[in-house]
Image (cartoon, grey):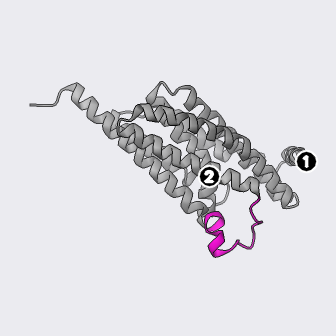
């Protein structure tokens, strides 16, 4: 006797929850791998020659980032195992970490440029760093806003991680024109699209529209990051934060 539509829907939902849990685990693994040599293993391997020692602000941002990735993984597994009430309770910790990322992210970016003496290439790269802050602020903020829409919420959370994964993948891949920020983090969007097609027969609008927009956003700084107006703006931001 074939399974009823209700049973099929229930099985698909359970599989989807496991998929998002494993995707969260892969995201955490990518973050650890990307920051291993330049941050996590510095006490063991020493500081790379082209890097400055981490400041307390950098450590605060790093702790917030990794705590966010761990909470994302915990939240995904709690939901996958049916512990929805604990998932919602832990969501408040996630929101606090989100605010921490929004505050420390731009401060680390601009103060890092100041510590390096404001070289033009670092002023130009602020277009990428601050662009990522805008991207994850808006996308993850939308995920919290639409938390009562599970299908949209969990996809917004994962696509928000695309912007956060640009830093670790930028350390893993050496590609021109910010392509490392698309090739690596874009795997998250690809995984979501493949899952949507397999499980639902179509790609969810959040995945297709926002996923593509996020990847395009990562390439957008190529159009202006070396322009005179951006270098002047970046210099003003560095002075403001200094």
In percent of width and height, residue 126 lies at 77, 50
Task: State whether residue 29 appears in this view.
Answer: yes
**Where residue 162 sits in the image (x, y, percent)?**
57, 46
Q: Quadrant of the N terminus?
A: top left
Q: Secondary structure at mark 2?
A: helix
Q: Residues within 10 Å of mark 1 (few under 14, many from 20)?
A: few
Circle 2 sits on which residue?
Answer: 166
Q: Earlier in the sequence, mark 2 or mark 1?
A: 2
In front of the other: 53 or 231: 53
Say whether residue 106 is magenta.
no
Rendered position, 15 above or below 173: above
198 and 20: which is toward the camera: 20
Q: Which quarter of the picture shows residue 52?
A: bottom right
In the rendered structure, the answer to whether residue 160 lies left or right of residue 176 reads: left
Q: Residue at x 75, y 70 (%)?
A: 50
Which residues are drawn in magenta? Answer: 37-55
Asked if 84 appears above or below 221 in the picture, the reply is above
Q: Residue at x 51, y 43 (%)?
A: 72
How far apart in space, not on screen, are marks 2 and 1 (Cα)? 25 Å
| Residue 33 pos. (x, y %) | 54, 62
Secondary structure state at the residue bearing disc 1: helix
Q: Which mark is residue 239?
A: 1
Q: Is residue 52 magenta?
A: yes
Residue at 44% x, 48% y is 23
Q: Nearer the viewer, mark 2 or mark 1?
A: 1
Instruction: Find out whether the residues at labels 2 and 1 contact each other: C-beta distance under 8 Å.
Output: no
Binning the other alpha carbons within 10 Å of mark 2 as few (below 14), some (14 to 19) or many (20 upward) gives: many
Apparent side of residue 148 relative to residue 34 in the rendered image (left or right): left
Residue at image point 33% right, 34% down: 13
Whole-percent x and y of residue 127?
76, 47
Name the disc covering residue 109, or none: none
């Amino acid at each position: 006797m074939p399974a009823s539509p209700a049973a099929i829907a229930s099985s698909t939902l359970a599989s989807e929850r496991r998929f998002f849990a494993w995707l969260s685990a892969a995201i955490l693994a990518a973050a650890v791998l990307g920051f291993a040599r330049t941050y996590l293993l510095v006490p063991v391997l020493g500081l790379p020659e082209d890097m400055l020692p981490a400041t307390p602000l950098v450590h605060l941002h790093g702790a917030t980032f990794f705590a966010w990735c761990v909470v994302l993984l915990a939240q995904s597994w709690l939901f996958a195992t049916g512990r929805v009430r604990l998932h919602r309770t832990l969501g408040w910790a996630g929101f606090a970490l989100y605010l921490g990322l929004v505050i420390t992210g731009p401060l680390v970016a601009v103060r890092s440029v100041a510590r390096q003496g404001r070289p033009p290439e670092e002023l130009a790269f602020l277009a990428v760093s601050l662009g990522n802050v805008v991207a994850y602020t808006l996308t993850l903020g939308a995920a919290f806003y639409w938390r009562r829409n599970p299908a949209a919420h969990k996809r917004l959370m994962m696509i928000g991680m695309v912007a956060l994964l640009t830093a670790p993948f930028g350390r893993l891949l050496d590609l021109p024109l910010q392509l490392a920020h698309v090739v690596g983090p874009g795997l998250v969007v690809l995984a979501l699209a493949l899952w949507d097609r397999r499980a639902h027969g179509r790609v969810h609008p959040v995945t297709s529209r926002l996923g593509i927009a996020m990847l395009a956003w990562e390439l957008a700084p190529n159009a202006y990051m070396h322009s005179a107006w951006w270098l002047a703006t970046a210099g003003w931001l560095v002075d403001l934060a200094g």
